[in-house]
Amino acid sequence: MIRNIKVEHLHETPIEKQETELVERKGIGHPDSISDGLAEAVSRALCKEYIDKCGAILHHNTDRDSDRCRKVSA
């Protein structure tokens, strides 16, 4: 199988070597912040239920970007 992987040299100063880093901050009312907070609350409640019912936290995703929870021992 041919893979479409390309490696390029970095032609900029790496962030860890820069004096200043610009970041985007999303405020409390931003839709992403609201959905992230909701997904986090759902995940916490689901983890608690998994522990209570299964004795372990099972893999789950509660938002489109989430891949944080994996099966772990209780």
Image: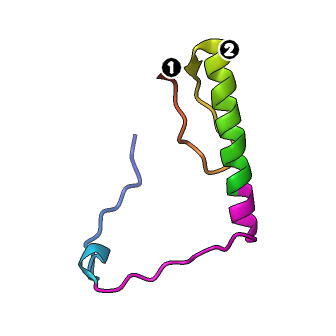
Q: Which residue is mark 1?
A: 74
Q: Nearer the viewer, residue 13 or 46?
A: 46
Kind of element beneath mark 2 = helix
- State which quarter of the image contains the N terminus: top left
For residue 20, above or below residue 60: below
On the image, the x and y values in percent for residue 20 come to 35, 86
- On the image, the x and y values in percent for residue 17 come to 23, 78
For label 1, count other residues whose C-alpha is less than 10 Å away and answer few (under 14), some (14-19) or many (20+).
Answer: few
Quarter holding residue 15: bottom left
* Residue 61 picture location, percent across and down: 65, 38
The three-letter amino acid code for the residue at tag 2 is Lys
Left or right of 61: which side holds 69?
A: left
Q: Is residue 16 visible?
A: yes
Look at 63% across and 13% down and name the residue there.
54
Predominant SS of the magenta segment: loop
- Mark 2 surroundings: few (<14), some (14-19) or many (≥20) residues within 10 A: few
Q: Which residue is mark 2?
A: 53
**Quarter location, residue 29:** bottom right
Q: Secondary structure at mark 1?
A: loop
